[in-house]
Image: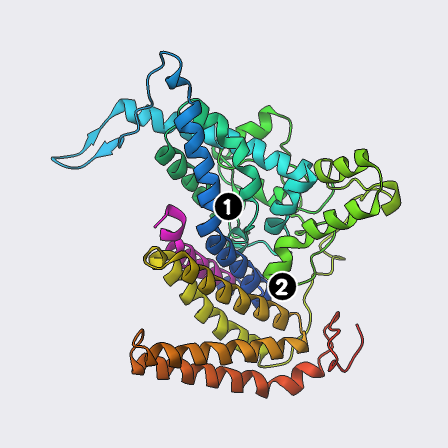
Amino acid sequence: MGVIAASIPLFFLLIGIELWYARARHAALFRLNDSIADMALGITSQLGGIFTKLISVGIYAAAFEFLRVQRWLPFGEWAGSAPVTFAGGFALHWAPLAAWTVSFILIDFAYYWEHRLSHEIHILWAGHVVHHSSEEYNLTVALRQSTLHGLFTWVFFIPLAIVGVPVAMFVTNYALNLLYQFWIHTRAIDRMHPWIEAVWNTPSHHRVHHGVNPKYQDKNYAGVFITFDKWFGSWVPEEEEPVYGITKPLATFNPVWANVHVFAEIGRLLMLTPRWRDKWRVVFGSPSWRPPEAGAPIVAPEVSKATFQRYDPPVPRGVPAYAFVQFLVALGAAYLLLTSGSRYPIVQLGAASFYVVLALSNLGLMLDGRAWVIVPEVARHAVLGLVAVVAAGVGAWSWTVGVLAAAACLASATWILALRSRLETNTAPGDESPGAALPA
């Protein structure tokens, strides 16, 4: 199990503490619909990572094996052993400690440029935009990650393989870099001591990075060390609290569309322009640039917290409770896949992951107020109930487990069908289902 998957209980503990803080201070830091969407995107990212990391880590491992300078020049290998040991008493090993420290800094430097260019190159922004599409800022937003972004960004870390950073050292330190960034996604912590703010990335620095305000956009790219932003001219201090989100709001809680919507926009623009030069610029140019056929470039408007309208569609009473319960079930299934999935064949793992993502997508559409999602949601419960009975019949599960699972599916299908009339008369915008009572 990787560092991030092992840290999931810690993430939820800290989210619980932040939620308690918000309740104690009567601060509106969370919305259920947005937080479920954040965590759903975290789940899809981790499940997708089971497959995409085989590619990105595999490429890194191949570059390390065949391209590292130690194969061709008389440079020593990195001291990749543990910097601290406890067997026979505490011992600190200076050479490995130096190697792990230097590699951590180099990884953060590479992360800075990967992050910066992910805001400046359209195809990279298509993956990274997922993380910015929430209009809230709390610890659940830290979990809002892309499933596809890693397929593009591995190239930024190949230089580390070339200089000989071992695969295990890279994977561990990169995970620690991401783990550090979790806690800075909060409004519960204001400014910290100036010495800390001078060197480290903090909640104040990172709030700026998530701001949609023009003066805050494309600033403060740091992972761990804010010094890189200060050196390369991309740092600005937090003045007033930012407005959070993206220039063109996502306007859905569906995790699948959140992952692909900018890729779809790139495809639309490629079809729209006939010139190869413009096609190249659509893919590798600025995310705000548009070919002449698509109109003027996108310019971020001035925004303020007083006038900004967050995406928060009304849903009928009972729907949030249903979505929350079903999310907990999907979360439990995903955690089992992440912690014990290596015991299953890749086909079964893929099928189970697809089913979890389908559940999360249905819940997101439900929180959007889409009435038509009742059909795939009932079908999902019917299929899962049938699988439970068949699995018990062939001996894969006990009959007790199979019957309980089938009964839970029947209860869930009955619950969502009971909410059908409420959803069909809901006023949520964008519901184009045949049974919708009101137009978009």
Place of residue 7 in the rendered image (x, y in percent of width and height, measured from the top left): 38, 51
- Neighbor class of circle 2 (other Cα within 10 Å; few <14, some 14-19, many 20+) is many
Residue 184 shows in this picture = yes
Q: Nearer the viewer, residue 277 or 37?
A: 277
Q: Amino acid at mark 1?
A: Ile
Place of residue 395 in the rendered image (x, y in percent of width and height, measured from the top left): 29, 76
As measured in the structure, the alpha-carbon distance from the residue carrying label 2 to the one carrying label 1 is 23 Å
Residue at the top extreme, as displayed: 74
In the rendered image of this protein, does residue 22 appear above or below residue 439?
A: above
Q: Main secondary structure of the magenta part?
A: helix
Residue appearing at x 45%, y 27% in the figure: 160
Residue appearing at x 52%, y 30% in the figure: 110
In this rendering, the label closer to the viewer, 2 or 1: 2
Q: Are marks 2 and 1 in contact (CB under 8 Å)?
A: no
Mark 2 highlights which residue?
A: 253
Residue 26 shows in this picture = no
Place of residue 373 in the rendered image (x, y in percent of width and height, measured from the top left): 63, 75
In the rendered image of this protein, does residue 163 appear above or below residue 365?
A: above
Please provide the residue range marked out in magenta.
1-22
Q: Give SS at disc 1.
A: loop
Whether residue 67 appears in magenta in the rendering, the answer is no
Residue appearing at x 76%, y 41% in the figure: 288
Place of residue 70 in the rendered image (x, y in percent of width and height, measured from the top left): 37, 18
Whether residue 21 appears in magenta in the rendering, the answer is yes
Residue 219 shown left or right of residue 332 in the figure:
right
Q: Give SS at disc 2.
A: loop
Mark 1 highlights which residue?
A: 184
